[in-house]
Amino acid sequence: MRGHPDAAEIRAWLETGHSAPALEAHLARCGPCAARLEEEARMEEALFEVAEAKPRARPSAAGWALAIVAAAASILLLLGTVTAERTSPSAPPHVDARALDGGVPRDGSVDP
Amino acid sequence: MTALGTTWTRLALLGGARARTEPELCEAALEGDAAAWDALFRLHQRRVLVALLARGVRVDRARDLCQDAWARLIVQQRAGRLRNLTLPGLAIRQALFLAAEENRRARSRRPHLPVHEVEPPADATTFERIVDRDRLARARVVLEGCPPTARRVFERLYAEPGVRHAEVAEELGLSVQRVRQIVCEVRKTLRAALEEGS
Ligand SMILES: [Zn+2]
């Protein structure tokens, strides 16, 4: 391929993910272009994350009333917990190792 | 048209004697259907590739790791260790795990390599999100402020695997050119929102 691909060319390739041997060979050995590719891929990944994120809930008037009741209830619960913690010994926290490594065991196997 | 309906259409467009929905493909893949594995790979490979590239994996390695991740999943299915398939998350986690493993091996073989040659992608096994919660919420607000058609175009193209511009255009009664233009505008708007304060 001729010269360095510009950001638009890299973006167009990322949009399809189709095989483009000449472009990919250049991106694999040219440092500045590899850096640009990473930057463009980060943005593409960010767009996936935005699209996949749950839309924010827009609470109705009834929703707001429920939210206020729930907030009040959680404050009462919190006060209760604080009082209880003062009087009873706490249990050691439980840590799930699978949660820490994202559910992928050390041997690389992925169980459902 | 529902998302499932459009996925069905898409798979029909991809060709093959019998079109199947993505859940059907997953079910068939879990029973060892090689054609179903191939179809799922085609649907999700771009997403897995982008996930690797975004974490600094070199493009040629990223291509190989995509294939390897899929091969690993198939091996696990054959060994009866895969009971459900949540894609593309499972394939991404597997690919990122393999990338980290490869880097660990390279580092132990050649401990004096310059760091940038073998630096593992950060948090490879945790599949950490690129966007932090605050920026994500801000970008989401911006997206919800876009015109409904623009939002629909963006969400169809980015939240559904393998969807094509032509398909979205037909579904929404727009020209392909207009769909491209819309997605370009939404991307630009979101880029600005995401870059703010990053
Ligand atoms: Zn270059």
Image (cartoon, grey):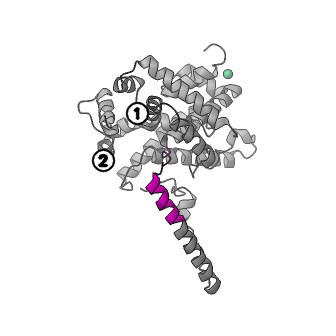
Say the numbered circle drawn on residue B198: none
Q: Is residue B79 left or right of residue B19?
A: right
Q: Is residue A4 left or right of residue A45?
A: right
Q: Position of residue B68 (x, y in %)?
A: 48, 41
* Residue A70 colored in magenta in the image: yes
Q: Position of residue A66 (x, y in %)?
A: 47, 61
**Magenta span of residues:** A53-71
Choose top left, top right, bottom left or bottom right for residue B19.
top left
Closer to us: B157 or B57: B157
Which residue is labeled 1 in the image? B42
Which residue is labeled 2 in the image? B27
Q: SS class of the residue under badge 2?
A: helix
Q: Is residue B113 above or below residue B126?
A: above
Label 1, residues with CA under 10 Å away: few <14, some 14-19, many ≥20: few
Q: Earlier in the sequence, mark 2 or mark 1?
A: 2
* Residue B6 colored in magenta in the image: no
Residue at 60% across, 42% down: B138
| Residue B130 seen anywhere in this rendered image of the structure | no
> Quarter for ligand 1?
top right
Residue at 50% across, 47% down: A56
Tell whether label 1 touches label 2 (CB within 8 Å).
no
Position of the C terminus of chain B by quadrant: top right
In which chain is the residue bearing label 1? Answer: B
Label 2, residues with CA under 10 Å away: few <14, some 14-19, many ≥20: some
Closer to us: A105 or B114: A105
Residue at 68% across, 47% down: B107
Position of the N terminus of chain B by quadrant: top left
